[in-house]
């Protein structure tokens, strides 16, 4: 099936490239500030500055106009009406409008919002614990609103809660110096919010202005206040430069670490599933960052600045290593060498939560012998687990709405056990907060989502992929039924599972035939393997194996004939396609690799039926081939790279990367299937280790296999990500990685492949269920749940709840009642009940 990218997607891609990335390759310029959301709070402070020549007008009238034009329909200013950040921004914007006697309607709407939400916001922040920045800024903006004549801002019943925040501020003012080394950012960076009774003279302010840019701790709001207090020209020069660079809606910090923003841009694009559209831009950014890391000396930083440094270095390491750059772990593990920094992190772990999140993710890409990464992983995991016990992350970090869920997900499910398509969905749905950071309020946020077009592209790209996947799955079901593979009457029928796994694991082009090739291979492997394991007699198995060796199905009957005919047609079909596309005939190579796989199944069947117990080495030699991963990835690799056609199929020449994949897939399967195979009288690597080492016990044997697997993964990742280990192009190596991720997903903590229900929700999310995002457009047609799952031996009846509520698009609940479908052999599956919520658009 051909599915070229829709014009609307391509148009969005072009617009984003024009806005975010320079079209001039000579300058390679990136407008990093287009990716950072404006701060309504700081913009309001710039708008408060009077023009020295016209005191009744603001010097930055454009900032005042921005405030007038950027109030939300609900009456607030800021990003999210349910955060205390918004409360402060709304008060500041109302103050500036009152200052210039404009926007009466805006002020009225703002008051209505505050009256409707103040109690909820104050109670919430009280329960979670008052952050330092809130305790300083909130009383200051309250005092300013009263001084400007804003009346009835707070209901009388909330005066107690407001007064409590004032008490918190006073404790901070009593305990801290104006600028000290123990608190960052220092009190002086909150100049605009400090009370008039606080003793600050002009010399204190001017002394701490930044020598290079004239700012007060890079804070637009504090610098605006500093200018109004001192008239210092350097402050004004800074503010003018800020507006010229960023426009009339200014960010909460300026200048920013532009390299960090670029890294966040790359991270955001990748996690939204949009890398394929920005490959050149990503490479340019990472090449520039790599050059910087190559030349930098041993990192040193002030303890109070360590969160930003660690955050940036860990993010850079992961992005660079994933791109194939040779970077040492010490580029971000440097903090482990500094006892004072380690102690500071442990004592102030809540401030380092985002940094430790990045450290933990960076350690996913660990190679053999990188013990510093093992130490960093253990250290960061301990602190992340500790952060999950907090109600709120205070001081410099404001918890993202869903940050704790992201941490829990990261700790609970290894990166290598997650499928990229579903990870993209999670990132789109979880990231509904638009700012990279809030300056003094929150220095380090997880992502930057200022560019609404980028989010729109992510949503449309995901839903277009869903439509492609849905159509391809229907085509695959027809193929499976046509060749009799979906109704064999024994074993597992996993048409949907096989397609879902390959489609969700790697972002192949929209019209890639690789998905169908790998999915059909997986279906044939599953059906044939089950025939050898549970259905065929030795006579039938020998005849089928011989037929595959000769590639001649004469004399076959029953299930053996069905399997061979489907395989023969499949091999001929892909050989013809390869000849047409790549110009070489790989028929014999395909036949050889399939015969090798069938021969290993026959060997295992003989072992099982005779009671023969192989050695571990003998078992692995057969088992690494019988698992079939090379049969999946090598034919597909020939379509990704024509030069591989006659090399990759030769057993003696299998690349180390392929052999590692084969072994790891077998080990993953065996760890989760030893109980079933023990009951069936079969051997696997766990049971063989137990037999040779009875003193280890079953848990010790499992641990031994996991340790072998863990070391193989590290070696495998190095072969995947680094050059010099093999001649495979990056696309083929990534296909190997995706195959491992599929097996890790199936067998991470159980045997999900053999379950009839474990993956149903994931399949729905990957292919059918519309995204839950505010700009998302629900699918135009409701998918047939019965058609989705009927091939998994489940009959589905949908019961429609007519008492639904309308929320922009029709929404209802489908209660799915799964009823066992009796197979030819009389087997069935358990009766289960799963509610799913699906969006549905009126047609």
Image (tube, rainbow, N blue to C red):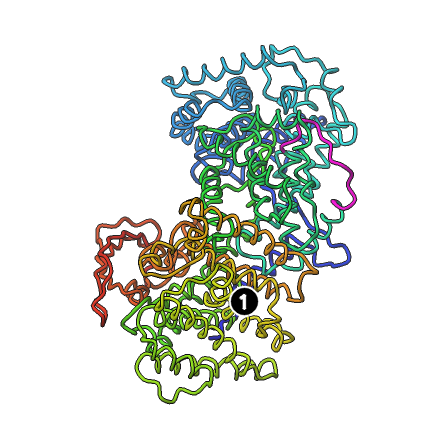
Instruction: Residue 725 in the image: state x and y as whole percent.
Output: 67, 61
**Height in image: 578 above or below 251?**
below
Instruction: Residue 710 in the image: state x and y as whole percent.
Output: 54, 49
Residue extending furthest bottom? 554
**Where does label 1 land, which residue?**
509
Left or right of 237, for residue 138: left
Q: Which residue is drawn at the image coordinates 45% and 35% (left, top)?
A: 81
Left or right of 166, for residue 264: right
Q: Is residue 579 a member of the stretch shown in magenta? A: no
Q: Few, some or many C-alpha atoms within 10 Å of disc 1 (few <14, some 14-19, many ≥20)?
A: some
Comparing 728 with 257, the one in front is 728
Q: Which residue is drawn at the image coordinates 44% and 22% (left, top)?
A: 153
For the C terminus, the image quarter is: bottom left
Q: Which residue is drawn at the image coordinates 51% and 49% (left, top)?
A: 415
Left or right of 399, for residue 373: right
Q: Quadrant of residue 351?
A: top right
Looking at the rendering, the stretch of residues picked out in magenta corresponds to 293-307
């Amino acid at each position: 099936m051909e599915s070229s990218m829709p014009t609307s997607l391509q148009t969005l891609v072009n617009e984003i490239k024009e806005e975010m990335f320079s079209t001039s390759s000579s300058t390679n310029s990136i407008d990093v500030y287009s990716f950072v959301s404006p701060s309504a709070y700081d913009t309001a402070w710039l708008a408060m500055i009077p023009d020295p020549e016209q005191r009744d007008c603001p010097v930055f009238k454009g900032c005042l106009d921005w405030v007038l034009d950027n109030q939300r329909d609900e009456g607030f200013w800021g990003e999210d009406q349910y955060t205390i950040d918004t409360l402060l921004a709304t008060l500041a914007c109302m103050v500036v409008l009152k200052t210039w006697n404009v926007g009466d309607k805006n002020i009225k709407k703002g008051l209505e919002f505050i009256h409707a939400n103040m109690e909820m916001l104050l109670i919430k922040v009280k329960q979670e614990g008052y952050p330092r920045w809130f305790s300083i800024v909130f009383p200051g903006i309250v005092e300013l609103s009263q001084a400007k004549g804003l009346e009835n801002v707070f209901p009388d019943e909330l005066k107690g809660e407001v007064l409590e925040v004032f008490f918190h501020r006073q404790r901070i003012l009593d305990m801290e110096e104006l600028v000290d080394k123990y608190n960052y950012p220092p009190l002086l960076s909150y100049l605009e919010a400090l009370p008039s009774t606080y003793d600050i003279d002009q010399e204190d302010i001017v002394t701490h202005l930044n020598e290079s840019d004239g700012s007060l701790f890079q804070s637009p709001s504090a610098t605006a206040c500093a200018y109004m207090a001192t008239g210092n020209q350097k402050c004004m020069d800074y503010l003018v430069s800020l507006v010229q660079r960023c426009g009339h809606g200014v960010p909460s910090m300026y200048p920013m670490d532009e390299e960090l923003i670029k890294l966040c841009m790359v991270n955001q694009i990748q996690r939204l599933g949009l890398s394929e559209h920005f490959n050149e831009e990503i490479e340019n950014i990472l090449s520039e960052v790599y050059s910087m890391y190559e030349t930098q000396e041993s990192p040193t930083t002030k303890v109070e600045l360590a969160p930003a440094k660690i955050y940036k270095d860990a993010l850079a390491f992961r992005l660079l290593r994933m791109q194939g750059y040779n970077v040492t772990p010490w580029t971000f593990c440097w903090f482990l060498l500094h006892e004072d920094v380690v102690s500071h992190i442990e004592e102030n772990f809540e401030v380092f939560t985002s940094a430790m999140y990045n450290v933990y993710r960076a350690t996913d890409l660990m190679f053999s012998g990188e013990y510093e990464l093992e130490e960093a992983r253990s250290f960061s995991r301990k602190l992340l687990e500790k952060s999950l016990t907090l109600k709120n992350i205070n001081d410099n970090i404001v918890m993202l709405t869903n940050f704790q869920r992201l941490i829990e997900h990261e700790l609970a499910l290894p990166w290598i056990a997650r499928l990229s398509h579903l990870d993209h969905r999670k990132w789109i749905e979880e990231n509904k907060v638009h700012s990279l950071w809030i300056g003094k309020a929150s220095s380090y946020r997880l992502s930057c989502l200022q560019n609404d077009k980028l989010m729109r592209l992510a949503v449309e790209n995901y839903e277009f992929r869903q439509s492609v996947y849905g159509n391809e799955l229907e085509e695959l079901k027809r193929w499976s039924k046509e060749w009799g593979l979906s109704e064999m009457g024994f074993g597992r029928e996993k048409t949907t599972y096989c397609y879902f796994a390959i489609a969700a694991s790697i972002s192949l082009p929209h019209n890639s035939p690789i998905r169908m090739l790998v999915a059909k291979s997986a279906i044939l492997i599953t059906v044939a393997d089950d025939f050898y394991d549970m259905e065929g007699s030795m006579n039938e198995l020998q005849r089928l194996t011989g037929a595959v060796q000769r590639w001649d199905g004469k004399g076959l009957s029953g299930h053996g004939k069905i399997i061979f005919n489907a395989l023969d047609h499949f091999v001929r079909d892909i050989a013809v396609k390869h000849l047409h596309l790549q110009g070489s005939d790989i028929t014999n190579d395909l036949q050889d690799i399939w015969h090798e796989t069938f021969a290993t199944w026959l060997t295992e069947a003989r072992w099982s039926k005779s009671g023969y117990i192989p050695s571990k080495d003998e078992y692995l030699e057969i088992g690494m081939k019988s698992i079939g991963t090379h049969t999946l990835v090598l034919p597909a690799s020939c379509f990704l790279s024509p030069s591989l056609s006659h090399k990759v199929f030769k057993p003696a020449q299998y690349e180390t990367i392929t052999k590692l994949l084969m072994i790891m897939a077998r080990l993953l399967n065996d760890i989760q299937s030893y109980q079933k195979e023990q009951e069936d009288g079969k051997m696997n690597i766990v049971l063989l280790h137990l037999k040779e080492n009875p003193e280890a016990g079953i848990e010790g044997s499992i641990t031994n296999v996991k340790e072998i697997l863990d070391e193989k993964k590290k070696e495998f990742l190095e072969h995947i990500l680094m050059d010099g280990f093999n001649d495979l192009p990056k696309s083929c190596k990534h296909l190997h990685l995706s195959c491992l991720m599929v097996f890790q997903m199936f067998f991470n903590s159980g045997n999900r492949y053999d379950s009839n229900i474990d993956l149903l929700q994931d399949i729905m999310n990957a292919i059918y269920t519309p995204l839950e995002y505010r700009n998302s457009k629900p699918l135009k047609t409701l998918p047939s749940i019965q058609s989705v799952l009927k091939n998994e031996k489940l009959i589905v009846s949908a019961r429609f709840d007519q008492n639904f509520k309308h929320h922009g698009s029709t929404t209802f609940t489908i209660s799915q009642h799964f009823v066992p479908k009796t197979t030819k052999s009389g087997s069935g599956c358990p009766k289960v009940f799963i509610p799913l919520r699906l969006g549905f658009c009126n047609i």
